[in-house]
Image (cartoon, rainbow, N blue to C red):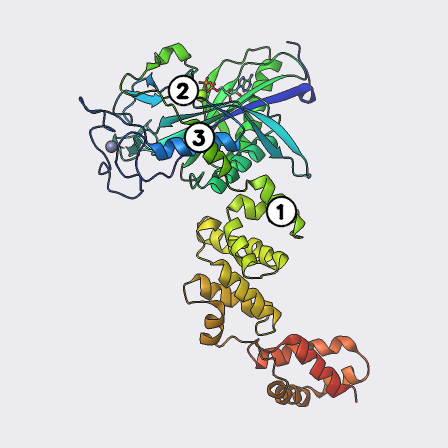
Amino acid sequence: MSAATATDWELVVGLEVHVELSTRTKMFCACPTDFGGAPNTRVCPVCLGQPGSLPVANRGAVESAIRLGLALGSEIAPTSQFHRKNYFYPDMPKNYQISQYDVPLCSGGVLEVPDGQGGSKRVGITRVHMEEDTGKSLHVGGSGRIHGADHSLVDYNRAGIPLLEIVSEPDLRSAEEARAYLAELRAIVLALGISDARLEEGAMRCDANVSVRPRGGEPGTRCEIKNLNSLRSLGRAIEHEAERQVALITAGEAVQQQTRHWDEDAGRTQLLRTKEATEDYRYFPDPDLVPLEPDQTWIDQLAADLPELPAATRTRLAELGVPAEAARTIVAAGLTPVLDAALGEGADPVEAANWLTNEVAGWAGERGLEPAEVPLAGADLAELIALVAEGTLSKKLAREVLEGTLAGEGSPRRVASDRGLEQISDTGALEAVVDQVIAEQPDAAQKVRDGNDKAIGALVGAVMKATQGKANPQLVNELLRSRLSG
Ligand code: ADP
Ligand code: MG
Ligand code: ZN
């Protein structure tokens, strides 16, 4: 390959995404999947791989996998199989992972990735298959990574939790496209309600396969990058990895197929292992599990019952006048149900979308919550908007009221009254304050009388201060003007 400038290079990316399903029980046993148990308390002979135990596939997990396959336009296999993927690692008690191999449950499909300019790019889906999660190792001492640790502990609570692996075709051409793909896949998963898809907590994990090639040329050798637990790391890792590969090739060296670890702090990828070949895993059909043969009527029913998917939601919101950016934020955050409930209570769509994107998403972010976890009923949002529209609350007071409602103090009307935050829109109550302020600030008052309109600001401010911000500013303005005009 001849030396070339960076602009001659084309980036090729394919993503492998793992999604932890939020079923009540594990993939092949009845152990609960909820977080937070003491280590090794959510385990049984099946997920610990003890002799004589027999796995049985979780119907709910299979249903989630089929629904995602249908949402992506995949072919649902009438017969598919579970295979054992054999390798040793301490976090995997059986020494093999139950996965799918040559006959996955879902094959093919397309993800329409929004390009941010109103269009979209079609990214091929290779397959969606089912597997089980591993346990978690905890390295004690040193930096918390295995190298330099004093000892390691292992917790099998996560071992056996159902996972979907969604493999894309190498159709992505930039870090930005890869991020948009992951965000859209996450929004689909949230719309289907099959996982909480938290990237930071590992409920959604992404490996990026990255290669570079001269534009239009033969595909290059790819490296697989692990440990990408945010959209930001995904983008940074791809860009960094592409630069590393271009530098190698430009220097006359070959890119080796490797698995690399993204180091977020150092901002670079590091060699984890030279890529293992599929043969190394000695895949063979799991003799303990019958083939999956989902009934066609079941599949048809699941297809008919699919919810509205993100692209359709965004289109619907656009038709209601919601700006594209706000619609994207709401859909990506999984806030559509709250918005729809508020609309059902008669809220104005644009107002409701503004409150959700400007206030609610921020409130969640400050507390490390997913927006969808925000304890806000659509009816409360609608009531808040109504209180502003009828003049009971200013926007500013409404923000305070929202805080109260989110803190569990009750409906907005209740919080406004309990906290004494209603806006004063009563002319009689405000006239006295207005007169007092005019008396206290004769110079400013005279300026307004002389036609200096800007001088009124100081007077409005004084009235607002005297009423602890509760006066209706528009009414204060009108009262001051009428007092000072004659
Ligand atoms: P493996 O088991 O080696 O990870 P998979 O089939 O699970 O293989 O995934 C292969 C991934 O690599 C897919 O996401 C695919 O799109 C991607 N890929 C294949 N060829 C290339 C390439 N030349 N450059 C970048 N990604 C690639
Ligand atoms: Mg892989
Ligand atoms: Zn178990």
Name the one closer to the observer, 93 or 185. Answer: 185
Please state which amino acid type lies under the numbered disc 3.
Thr
Q: Quadrant of residue 8?
A: top right
**Residue 37: x, y in percent?**
26, 43
Mark 1 and mark 3 lie on one chain; the one further toward the N terminus is: 3
Label 1 CB less than 8 angstroms from ligand 1: no
Tell me if residue 389 comes above or below residue 211 in the rendering: below
From the image, state whether disc 3 or disc 2 is nearer to you: 3
Q: Are marks 1 and 2 in contact (CB under 8 Å)?
A: no
> Please, what secondary structure does the residue beneath circle 3 have?
helix
Q: Quadrant of residue 33?
A: top left
**Residue 482: x, y in percent?**
74, 85
Q: Which mark is residue 316?
A: 1
- Residue labelled with disc 2: 79
Name the one closer to the observer, 345 or 183. Answer: 345
Please state which amino acid type lies under the numbered disc 2.
Thr
Q: Are marks 1 and 3 in contact (CB under 8 Å)?
A: no
Mark 1 and mark 2 lie on one chain; the one further toward the N terminus is: 2
> Please, what secondary structure does the residue beneath circle 2 have?
loop
Q: Which mark is residue 202?
A: none
Please state which amino acid type lies under the numbered disc 1.
Arg
- Residue labelled with disc 3: 297
Residue occupying the far right of the picture: 451
From the image, state whether disc 1 or disc 2 is nearer to you: 2
Mark 3 and mark 2 lie on one chain; the one further toward the N terminus is: 2
Numbered disc total: 3
Tell me if residue 143 comes above or below residue 336 in the rendering: above
**Residue 4: x, y in percent?**
68, 15
221 with respect to 226 (left or right):
right
Q: Quadrant of ligand 2?
A: top left
